[in-house]
Image: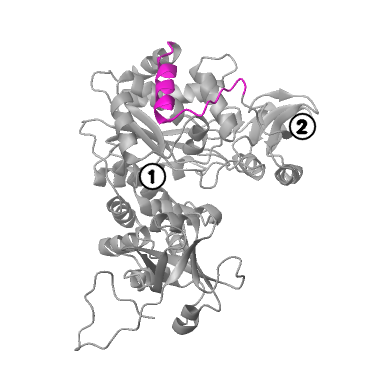
Amino acid sequence: MHIAPDGQAPNTPSTPPAPALTTLALRRVAIDTYRENVAYLHRDCAVVRAEGFQALSKVAVRANGQRILATLNIVDDPVIVGCDELGLSEDAFMQLAVANGYPVSISQAEPPESIGALRRKISGERLNQADFKAIIRDIADLRYSKIELTAFVVATNRDELDREEVYYLTEAMVASGRRLDWNEPRVVDKHCIGGIPGNRTSMLIVPIVAAHGMLCPKTSSRAITSPAGTADTMEVLANVELPIEQLHDLVRKHRACLAWGGTAHLSPADDVLIAVERPLSLDSPGQMVASILSKKISAGSTHLVLDIPIGPTAKVRSMPEAQRLRRLFEYVAQRIGLSLDVVITDGRQPIGFGIGPVLEARDVMRVLENDPRAPMDLRQKSLRLAGRLIECDPDVRGGDGFAIARDILDSGRALAKMNDIIAAQGAKGFDHRTTALGALSFDVRAPVAGMVVGIDNLQVARIATLAGAPKVKSAGVELLCKLGDTVAADDVLYRVYASFAPDLEFARQACQKSNGYAIGKAADLSHVFVES
């Protein structure tokens, strides 16, 4: 079946008559396909037989002047979709924006224009600026199937991008979406490259610097491979999926926000790529730099403090590796006009006591409330990074930022600002004194007496994820011992929380294989990486 482009004039006698359009009834298929548009046709549908549609091919769906691209799935069960129906997954149905039963048509989608560039990258070739613009434009327009997206992600991970390619990729990702302009000379932000569980410093830095008067529109991604991202944890406290108009208004009023960047349409190609990187657990340096810096430029940031933690089980394992990554960030930031301050921090262990959205939100609120139970490592790291941002203020003398940040936190001004932001975004009613954690739990105990000399960030994060985080907000890991703590045999090292018995069992089995803790002597304690 050939469908003429929307709005095309009727056939004239000089052109062959087009076949009559075959319409199908739209059916909403309640399947979350995680940011991939999926269409469903029954195998015995006349359109499938006539057009020879293949499963996983890309198709164009049209209705009421709207057009979306989707990946086709062929089904045999009429309960899912009948022969006279076309089903759409949740995301696709919402994008098409018509009612159930509305007449729709379907046709083969044209191959992405950039498919040749993709094939050359798969072959290991270096791509130019135009190649990356074409690829990212097609990705943002959802022209790539999951298979093609995976090929791009794996190809750029295997054959690492050079620094010019990283710049081209970053520039293309910025161009693929909206770019905010706050009409202010200094718009500040802080970002961490990730890999350290519980590292919710952004949720403390944002209210501190906003209380100082700086503009800090913080847009964050959800977790890629971790038990929680900033957006996942903030979602415990308030709504994070904000329409761009609401986000703009509350930033103007409160000087800050803590929102998910997806609804703002900032670097949308990055969100599509993240959906592929998550299950593959891939986060190559080039993709990381492009992802982070494109989001910051798109959000209108002019000054960024970047946290690169290093440690035996962090994303970055050594100082030479951290310095190489730092230079790559600095090169691309300079090319795109972003003032960048890189801070290399201690990444030997999780920050704070909680790993998982509710547990991390509890840590954040305890720090803001100056609660004696607040984790001091989270407090101190947040103050150091907030101080670096405050020193972007030309009226602040270099070295004074930490003291200013500490005064804002201790005085309660940061808490007041955070409460304002929460209320403006739509408070969820979270109270760390009463909000329940997962109803199921078990303790992980020290097998021998000694000192905690190592904590595997990857393993404890994996255990928290198996327990259900971040999808189950109340799931995760509560750390009761940190590096340098002395323990007796059978002391509790940490507690695992889950809401569902299978999740609890998955986490228990992972702990039995490796609990992520090393117990030894003081001389075995891993080296401290000092901030620079």
Magenta-drawn stretch contains 418: yes
> What distance separates the C-alpha of mark 2 from that of mark 1?
43 Å
Coordinates of residue 196 in the picture (x, y in percent): 54, 37
In the picture, which quadrant includes the N terminus? bottom left
Q: Which residue is mark 1?
A: 263
Coordinates of residue 164 in the picture (x, y in percent): 30, 55
Coordinates of residue 221 in the picture (x, y in percent): 44, 43
Mark count: 2
Q: Sequence-wise, which precedes: disc 2 or disc 1?
A: 1
In the image, residue 196 sits, relative to residue 378, either above or below, namely: below
Residue at far top of view: 411
Q: Quadrant of residue 155?
A: bottom left
Q: Quadrant of residue 474?
A: top right
Of residues 349 and 492, which is closer to you in this image?
A: 492
In the picture, which quadrant includes the C terminus? top left
Coordinates of residue 81 in the picture (x, y in percent): 55, 67
Is there any visible trace of residue 387 in the rendered image?
no
**Given contact means CB atoms under 8 Å apart, are the residues at marks 2 and 1 in contact?**
no
In the image, residue 430 sits, relative to residue 465, either above or below, namely: above
- State the mark number for residue 445: 2
Of residues 408 and 380, which is closer to you in this image?
A: 408
In the image, which residues are magenta?
411-434
Q: Along the horizontal axis of the image, is 357 left or right of 477?
A: left
Q: Amino acid at mark 1?
A: Thr
Q: Residue at x 26, y 23 (%)?
A: 393
